[in-house]
Image (cartoon, rainbow, N blue to C red):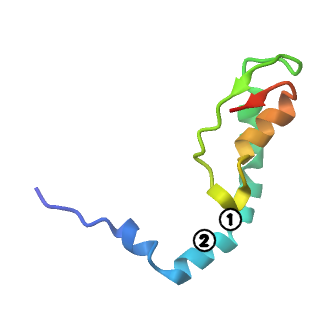
């Protein structure tokens, strides 16, 4: 068995890679918005149903604030929802 080297860690130490990734972040988010909207529409709640949405914080962090795209879309589709 051969030990593999984690090349992902080395990639994220590159300022150029980080800047390029950050520059394209908005473009990637715009391209995925329909996926997030579909996910939100699939929630088993009606528009006026109250429910709590647990935001696990698995988004892009401080750059986008506490509300990820998924959370925004869930809130948009179900205005009575609450984020935790």
The residue positioned 77% from the left and 29% from the top of the image is 82
Residue position marked by numbered label 2 in the rendering: 21
Q: Quadrant of residue 31?
A: bottom right
Q: Quadrant of residue 13?
A: bottom left
The quarter of the image holding the C terminus is top right
* Mark pair 2, 1: CA separation: 6 Å
The quarter of the image holding the N terminus is bottom left
Query: 20 left or right of 72?
Result: left
Pick out the residue farthest to the front: 84
Foreground residue among 30 and 75: 75
**Is disc 1 surrounded by few (<14), some (14 to 19) or many (20+) residues within 10 Å?**
few
The residue positioned 72% from the left and 24% from the top of the image is 52
The residue positioned 38% from the left and 74% from the top of the image is 10
Residue position marked by numbered label 1 in the rendering: 25
Q: Quadrant of residue 41?
A: top right
Establish if 84 lies above or below 32: above
Residue 69's x, y, as percent? 74, 47
**Is disc 2 surrounded by few (<14), some (14 to 19) or many (20+) residues within 10 Å?**
few
Residue 48's x, y, as percent? 89, 18
Query: 80 left or right of 29?
Result: right
Establish if 15 lies above or below 5: below
Establish if 65 lies above or below 26: above
The residue positioned 81% from the left and 18% from the top of the image is 50
Describe the element under mark 1 as helix, strand or loop. helix
Q: Are marks 2 and 1 in contact (CB under 8 Å)?
A: yes
């Amino acid at each position: 068995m051969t030990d593999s080297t984690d090349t992902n860690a080395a990639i994220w130490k590159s300022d150029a890679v980080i800047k390029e990734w950050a520059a394209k972040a908005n473009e990637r988010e715009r391209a995925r918005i329909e996926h997030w909207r579909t996910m939100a529409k699939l929630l088993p709640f009606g528009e006026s149903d109250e429910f709590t949405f647990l935001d696990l914080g698995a988004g892009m962090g401080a750059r986008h604030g506490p509300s990820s795209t998924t959370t925004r879309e869930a809130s948009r589709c179900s205005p009575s929802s609450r984020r935790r």
